[in-house]
Amino acid sequence: IDWFLPWPQDALVAVSTKFIGDFEMACDESVKRKLQAHMGGVHVAVTKACREYFDKFRRNVYVTPKSYLSFIAGYRSLYDQKLGEVRVLADKINSGLSKLFDAKADVKTMQVDLAAKNVELAEAQKVSATLLKEISANTTVAEKEKAKVNVIVDAVTAKASAIAAQKAEAEADLAKAQPALDAALAALDSIKPKDITNLKAMKNPPDLVKRVFDCVLLLRQYPIEKTKWQEFKGFMCFNSSENYPTSVKMMGDSQFL
């Protein structure tokens, strides 16, 4: 008597729907339904293969409903593990890019300020040099005129000192920003080729990862499609799926990191 009676595929799909339906996944409901149907189909296929094995070799391999439940439980556990790894990787990428952008903006602002101060300092030095030449050439000028010139020289010197102090302050601010830039570069260096390989192997990563790669495409001046909105679990968010194939090609570049 064969006590291991197989379940019909509809019953298998109903069981997978029970365990996967309320399971949190980074996909929409249509993908979930396909997954649930696929699980039932896989179990039916394995059961059929066991019958064929028995017909050929006269040896029984039993695939029971308990095996099916263990298969579903194993899938849930593995999915949670891999989803956690992807989220950790996404957090590292976001943190590194955020620090890099902040440091880049700060350095650019300070460079602009420093360039402006250098121009003012050079102009002040030219004015001072011109006045000193005029004073040397006109030694016969009256003491009154000499006093006026001395007043002008003092004013110009004071202005040059003020500009020099501002320059030193700008350079100090630039030095303060350097650790932030170094920290951003260090965070970016924590991304290893293995992490990129794991991302390339994912056929459909979470939307957050795709959105991060949209930013990388913009930074590296790759062509991207027009951003579209989509509804996900009652919220409106960006649809980054159309640009992800370009991101995969970009990750294939040996000089990407």
Image (cartoon, helix red, strand yellow):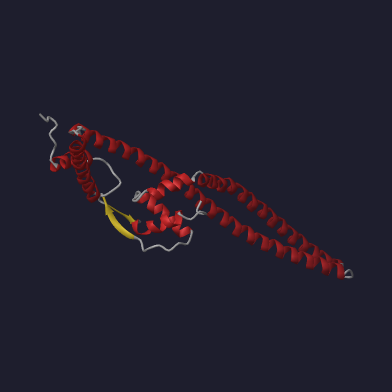
- Where is residue 228 shown, x and y percent of the image? 32, 60
Q: Which of 217 and 7 is in front in this view?
A: 7
Work out which residue is located at the far front of the displayed protein and give it: 57
Q: Is residue 140 left or right of residue 89?
A: right
Q: Is residue 206 left or right of residue 171?
A: left
Q: Where is residue 231 in the image (x, y as percent from the top left)?
A: 27, 54
Please indicate, yes or no, whether residue 177 appears anywhere in the rendered image: yes
Residue 25 appears left or right of 85: left
User: Residue 128 versus residue 112: which sits nearer the camera?
Assistant: 112
Q: Where the N terminus falls, by quadrant? A: top left
- Whether residue 145 is visible: no
Whole-percent x and y of residue 25?
28, 44
Residue at the far left in the pictured view: 1
**Identity of the residue drawn at 38% across and 59% down:** 243
Q: Position of residue 105 (x, y in %)?
A: 53, 55
Give whichever of 241, 136 is nearer the camera.
241
Name the image quarter holding residue 167.
Answer: bottom right
- Foreground residue, 165 or 243? 243
Q: On screen, 85 above or below 103?
A: above
Residue drawn 45% across and 53% down? 251
Position of residue 231 relative to residue 25, above or below, is below
Image side of residue 246 versus residue 30, left or right: right
Tally of numbered tags: 0
Residue drawn at x 21%, y 47% is 33
Going by the picture, which residue comes out furthest to the right? 140
Q: Residue at x 31, y 58 (%)?
A: 229
